[in-house]
Amino acid sequence: MSIAEVIEKVEVKNPGEPEFHQAVREVLESLEPVINKHPEYAKAKILERIVEPERQIIFRVPWMDDNGDIQVNRGMRIQFNSAIGPYKGGLRFHPSVYPGIIKFLGFEQIFKNALTTLPMGGGKGGSDFDPKGKSDNEVMRFCQSFMSELYRHIGQTTDVPAGDIGVGGREIGYLYGQYRKITNQFDSILTGKAINWGGSLVRPEATGYGTVYFTQEMLKTKGDSMEGKTVLVSGSGNVAQYAVQKANQLGAKCVTLSDSGGSIYDPDGISGEKWDYVMDLKNVQRGRIHEYAEKYGVEYFEGERPWKFEADVALPCATQNEVNEAEAKMMMDNGVIALAEGANMPSIPEAIEVYQDAGILYGPGKAANAGGVATSGLEMCQNHIGMSWTFEETDAHLLRIMVSIHEQASKAAEKYGYPGNYVMGANIAGFIKVADAMLDQGHW
Ligand code: NDP
């Protein structure tokens, strides 16, 4: 079957799931030179197998709200590929969650995890539950009900979920508590745990820090650095918060943040006390980003994304498909020379074409945001050996891994005739590692 036929079959077999189709197309179209060079992959039907999840679990999650009414959500875990290690990937709690979103994320996760150098397969899960506006008790009851089903499908050598949109330290805590209550085991079955009960230092920071480390590596290839750069950041959750902190530490100035309500623009930069305020606003008060604009007297753009301002670097860190073609062009006109994706698939395919035509440094999510899952891998490693590393040790591992991901993507891109193209490079390097493992293990 040709690549085009595999893509067509995915579309027919998974109707109404455009995000999954988009992710499959993006990866498979870049594999043409690899498939041509390695007929053994076609013979073993690696493409046909890799687009089909090994297992999909969908379950009912009933819970009681604060009024005593029963609510019902849908939970799911898609265990996509375990050829190189236990399934690993986050849980997303957001009203938009349905199998098409979880499949797109799980599929991306296979290749991302392969790039981290650690033995982790790909999976993803979540629920259409919306933690926004819920009390802590409601979130706890939901998490307990969710884990009451999920626990039977996960395990420290089977599947190890983590956080994602709507699943932060609070949710991981409630999920882990329920797992322990049911199983009477203190297993390493979740990552993103708090530091005093099995978590790893640097895990909260890892995705944002890693995205900036990757940006720095891309800039280095041009003899440049983050020092003095003006940066656009979208989102104001976990990834955005720590991308801003690391960019600040490397001498850059971040001028935007956003949430689903709109964006703020602070030309003086979001640092020091203002960054502390964002951390409190989003993680403790659970407030909205427009409150930043009111507190510091800067502009708020309701319903708008933050891509229209002059800058050197852009870091989309909110959600999928948050940069369209017109916005990508606007960024090119406004001086952006490097863009790295903290979020998963934040750029639509037409936006990616704009970056590539303009020849900017473009780091796709599966390479640029792999620091999060890599540090989850480091958390599992510390749990297995029963030790905790210092912040400096863990951060050094994260930096080394991000440098290695950059190098693997660069080398694969060059080897297959696309120098500087990190999309081709990351897809090819991640794919080859998993495909070879699948070949070694026979056709199941
Ligand atoms: P959080 O829930 O902490 O933050 C998400 C942020 O994005 C919030 O500011 C949220 O605003 C905004 N957002 C979410 N959905 C939308 C939407 N539809 N339109 C506009 N804004 C939106 O999540 P994370 O920071 O953990 O995740 C952000 C991205 O990074 C996701 O794509 C995730 O898959 C990816 N990622 C995360 C990793 C991690 O370790 N956490 C690892 C690798 C990738 P609001 O509060 O208004 O919803």
Image: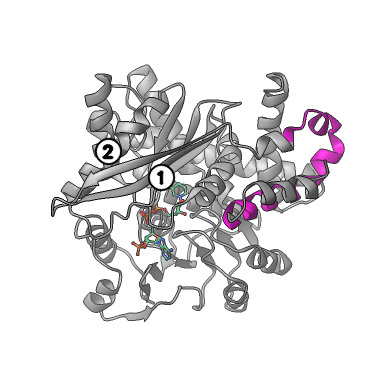
Q: Is mark 1 within 8 Å of ligand 1?
A: no
Q: In the figure, 266 relative to 417: above or below?
A: below
Point out the frontmost of discs 2 and 1. 2
Ligand 1 lies in which image quarter? bottom left
Q: Is residue 8 left or right of residue 286?
A: right
Three-letter amino acid code of the residue under disc 2:
Ser
Residue drawn at (71%, 53%) of the image? 421
Give the residues in magenta.
18-46
Q: Position of residue 308 (x, y in %)?
A: 51, 78
Residue drawn at (35%, 72%) of the image? 261
Q: Position of residue 41 (x, y in %)?
A: 79, 32
From the image, which quarter does the C terminus lie in? top right
Numbered label attached to residue 204: none
Q: Where does label 1 land, which residue?
A: 126
User: Magenta segment, principal secondary structure?
Assistant: helix
Residue 60 shows in the view:
yes
Q: CA distance from mark 2 to mark 1?
A: 13 Å
Query: In the image, is residue 40 part of the stretch drawn in magenta?
Result: yes
Classify 10 Å Cα crowding around label 1: few (below 14), some (14-19), many (20 and above): many
Q: Secondary structure at mark 1?
A: strand
Residue drawn at (27%, 66%) of the image? 274
Q: Nearer the viewer, residue 309 or 98?
A: 98
Q: Position of residue 313 (x, y in %)?
A: 53, 65
Residue drawn at (25%, 76%) of the image? 296
Q: Is residue 231 left or right of residue 143?
A: right
Three-letter amino acid code of the residue under disc 1:
Gly
